[in-house]
Amino acid sequence: MIQSLFTPFLFQSTAQAITPILFAALAGVLCGRVGVFNLALEGQILVGAFAAIVGSYFGHSALVGVAAGMAGAAVFSLILGYGATIFRGDPVVIGIGMNLLASGLTAYLLRVVFGVSGTFSDPNVVGLGRITIPALVSVPVLGWAFGRQSALTFAVWALTALISVVLFLTPVGLRLRGVGEQPAAAGALGIDVARYRSVTVLIAGALTGLAGAQLSLGAVSVFAEDMSAGRGWIAVVAVMLGRNNPLYAAAACVLFGFADAIGVNLQSHGLPSQLTDIAPYVATLLALVISHRRRTRASLRSRQSAPATEREGQRVGATNSPPLDD
Amino acid sequence: MSAFSSALKLAGDRLRIPPVALAIGFAALVGAALILVSGHDPMSAYVEIAKGSLSFEALPDTLNWATPLVGMTLAAAVPLRGGMVNLGGDGQLVIGGLIGALAPLFLPGHGALGATVGLALAGLGGGVYAALAAWGEVRHGVPMLISSLLLSYPAIGVTSYLARFPLRDVSTGLPQTLMVPSDARLYVLSGALNVGSLLIAAIAIAVVFVDQRTSAGYELRMRGKNPHFAKYGGVQLARQAVRTMFASGAIAGVVGAIIVLGSQFRFIDGALVTPAYTWSGLMAALLVSGEPVGAIVAGLFFAALQTGGFAMQRETSVPRVLTLVLQAIVILFLAMRRGLGRRT
């Protein structure tokens, strides 16, 4: 069983499963760094997936599809970009509203534009081509994972590196982090906080568009209602676990992608899909519990020796309710 | 954007239009644009929604649709009143639904007793599952906002598996459990309406009573306004979170059992999740920040909107999923409008 599970196909589907989650997680990291809690990733992916299909169908090219996906998701993210900055709305409420708007709007437009409900696929939709990098093919694990994949599967890792460099090694990154950590101080230094935030949310929106394009034009060229299927929420958890660090978030995404791929592979061994589909969510929940357990213990220890600083809580979980310790 | 926001402020401050009315008006405008895109007439579509939900013949349908929707509105409103969000309504709903479908089949006790036991166990199951998310937050610091939602997926997956394989009614080709014996079904009042609607009404009254007349309700409201103040005033926040989430999940579980025992008579895979009662209910509760009376009114309003949506789709072939878009726009508009008020 174990032997037949660890096949090249497992690594290939892992790399595939990681791609949309990691794009979305990078978007969440960027938003988190400038102090905007992005709970709308799920809806943004969905809008991106739909826009990508529309672009590819009418533009007869996968490239147009990807561009449309980025543009569609970026325009959609304006709601969060303006809503959480100029209008100062509650990001949790805006996130929930955006996810439902995305679900309703894509289903509505699916019926209006293509005249179908449920799923849409058409020979006119051009999917993303697969690329083979000869130098990689002979490397054991990497070769299996990245042997024949869409360009986005490679791009997501390049972007992870790029965003890490920009965030931690450039002046722009310093300003971005400043806007998130000390908005008042950043403002006093002449940085337009609201503008930095809305532009970052816009760029993050384009990233979620790439996640959507990978979903609808990647492995198969099809759009299905609610096809984001919780990936945006998993990305939200990856951002939390990674504490807004792109590299740690990527590590979390690898774990969730691997769980997803194990599930898909178990399915081909005869397990019902209803059970294997929950694998990534169970892995996500377990990761949340394990990481927060350790963190709670550590903060308890430090509280005994020194006065508690609530920064950690504010960063990670303080969206729903205050630190609950009585 | 600033012109838009100042126009908003003008409409709100000078003309004294209530924000909710403003939000509904704005949603109607965006909806009209979307209907125009689809090549139909917005006016006639809206008239069909009104006729299809509020006319004398349509009213029972609206009430029937409102039963689960108002139930899920209450399930969302209870934690929201204390500043907590339960995103896991779907999971609690399917757990309650499955328990409601199985209890009369496998437990002793016939007739009304079987149904009562089913409803009670469904509430218990949904409540415990929701309380699990709260326990994870107070005990291990796992944010409930996320964990409540993530817990939904295993619940939906496992119940779906059970309905498809071990518990499936093999005499039909569909993924559903055996029929509930007819004497354990909820008593029919008239037409499609059954005792379940009365039960939801009773739960609604109970929620309003607890909110306005008891110290537990007062403490929960206090937490919603300022949790630090509530803690300072002696409220045990951890216990309160677990209790509140239990109540929320219990309502969701009972709603699931009411749907199963009242109208479908078996657990059908996907039938509880597909109509998105959870999400419409959450939006209705968000509309009024969890204030129970307002939430019930909002739930009824959304139920009318959705029931009218069926008529609209039938008569004008505008897809009824448009009503979901309208609901989301109302919520987004209000979220930003409240933010504007906060700045001044």
Image: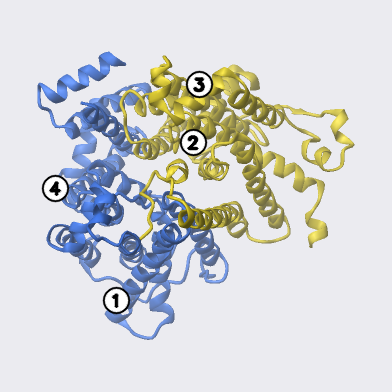
Chain colours: A yellow, B blue
Q: Amino acid at mark 4?
A: Phe
Q: Amino acid at mark 1?
A: Thr
Which chain is home to disc 3?
Answer: A
Asked if the residue at tag 4 contacts the one at tag 1, i.e. Cβ–Cβ closer than 8 Å, the answer is: no
Q: Visible in this render: residue A136?
A: yes
Marking on residue A41 = 2
Identify whether B100 is placed above or below B221. below
Quadrant of the rendered structure where residue B251 is?
bottom left
User: SS for tag 2?
Assistant: helix
Residue B9 pos. (x, y %): 19, 22
Asked if the residue at tag 3 contacts the one at tag 1, i.e. Cβ–Cβ closer than 8 Å, the answer is: no
Question: Which residue occupies the extreme left position in the image?
Answer: B15
Quadrant of the rendered structure where residue A257 is?
top right
Question: Is residue A42 or residue A292 the one in the foreground?
Answer: A292
Marking on residue B56 = 4
Asked if the residue at tag 1 contacts the one at tag 2, i.e. Cβ–Cβ closer than 8 Å, the answer is: no
- Quadrant for the N terminus of chain B, please: top left
Q: Name the residue carrying label 3.
A: A175
CA distance separating discs 1 and 3: 61 Å
CA distance separating discs 2 and 1: 41 Å
N-term-proximal mark, 1 vs 4: 4
